[in-house]
Image (cartoon, grey):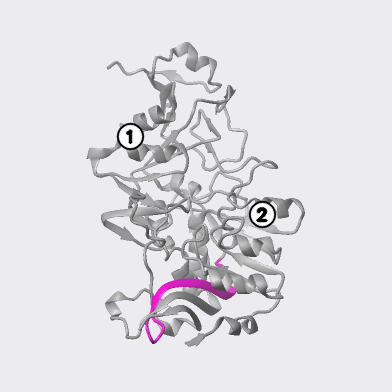
Amino acid sequence: MKFIQLNEVEELLSDNLTIMFGGFMGNGSPHNLIDVLVDSKINFITAICNDAGLEDYGLGKLIRTEKITKLIASHIGLNPNVAKQMNNNLIDVRLLPQGTLIECIRAGGYGLGAVITPTGVGTPLETPENTITIDNRKYLIEKPLNADLSIIYGTKCDILGNIKYSGTTQNFNTKMTLASEKVIVEVEEKVDYIFDPDEIDMHYSLIDYIYVNKEIR
Amino acid sequence: MKNLIAKRVADELNEGDIVNLGIGLPTLVSKYVDDKNIVFQSENGMLGLETYNGEKNDNITDAGGSLASIKDGGMFFDSAFSFGVIRGGHVDVTVLGALEVDQEGNLANWIIPGKLVPGMGGAMDLVVGAKKVIIAMQHTNKGRKKILKKCTLPLTAAGHVDMLITEMCVFQFTSEGMELIELCNGYTLDDVKENTEAEFKIKIKST
């Protein structure tokens, strides 16, 4: 695990990356890391995120740049730019139920072969190819999701990079930590001691990079 | 009118229930549950959701992304756990709005193809997982019928609706089909029939 500055983030990026973004409607989102992507020259991002934020908040800031050409999410309705870009064929959107999306990310990180869920049976998500019946109950099969990069958030970290989450900020962040090749975490505050093992939500050995907004002494 | 519907929904909740309220009209239900010790779940990661009480904590939001608070004794968790609670059948009641409901208990509330594509969010999981699904909505959309013989819009889930509460009446869905069990607020059976395309049995409970 390495602590980095914002100006070191761009060299970790390139075109055509699949990136998982933590956060739920901007809550628990890595806002400053998103700004780096907004200002960067990279393009053709496949983004995996619960939602598209608002027009100018959270992932919405990156959506506005049209650098995301493919989006896998559960809800996009609160960002009108997504619909506009869809209509102009600038973005391909795949909608998954939120429970299926988080399970696919969890399965990707946890080394499972598939997600088998009753959610979506009887809806347009069901096809002849993706259904399975177990003990007389129908389920849909979805493949796990993995990414090149997870760009996520943490509330506090300690001097080693162990992470704690506050409030509802955990959402997709912890599962996204395991599902990507490389993990960059934006943390609000870094304390100057080591957290008690009872207190932590994510271990530093599972993280590659941390950008700290504020150091607390 | 929305508050009347919300109040009637609240009558269906039992002491200590775990309840998940969808956005829009369903959120009003929380105003009417005072003494029942309801545990409200917010799909983005908490049990014990409380409307924002003024103690600003940017780290706590509800499922619409607005500032919220957590009750004493509440719990925070991640999205995988949250949807385990939802899909795994641990939510006693979910209350959602609808674009369309049909007489088979099918629900459509996530897309109008070519016109409105907000996405399903947690709705599909909620309807499949919750022990009781209550749809709370206005009976018609500016006079246009929403309670149909068969949904025309893509479904959120098939056959999971248990109860439908509007300003006019209450329907329940059982193995016998769709039943009108209550007329509300001075509306008559004719009012309901004129504004409902779905076919239903009349089983109005006498008070």
Chain under disc 1: B
Q: Is residue B117 visible?
A: yes
Q: How many numbered callouts?
A: 2
Does B183 appear above or below B72? Answer: above
Q: Give the camera-side residue of A6 and A22.
A: A6
Circle 1 is placed at which residue position?
B10
Give residue B68's position: percent from left, percent from top.
Answer: 38, 53
Q: Give the camera-side residue of A54 and A22.
A: A54
Instruction: Tell me the tag on residue B49.
Output: none
Q: Quadrant of the N terminus of chain B?
A: top left
Does B16 appear above or below B191? Answer: below
At label 1, the amino acid type is Ala
Q: Secondary structure at mark 1?
A: helix
Q: Give the camera-side residue of A140 and B35.
A: B35
Between the C-alphas of marks 2 and 1, the distance is: 36 Å
Counting other residues with Cα less than 10 Å from the Cα at mark 1, is it few (<14), some (14-19), or many (20 or more)?
A: many
Counting other residues with Cα less than 10 Å from the Cα at mark 2, is it few (<14), some (14-19), or many (20 or more)?
A: many
Chain under disc 2: A
Is residue A155 one of those drawn in magenta?
yes
Q: Which residues are magenta?
A: A144-162
Circle 2 is placed at which residue position?
A82
In the image: residue B152, left or right of residue A209: right
Is residue B165 one of those drawn in magenta?
no
Q: Quadrant of the C terminus of chain B?
A: top left
Q: Give the camera-side residue of A147 and A82.
A: A82
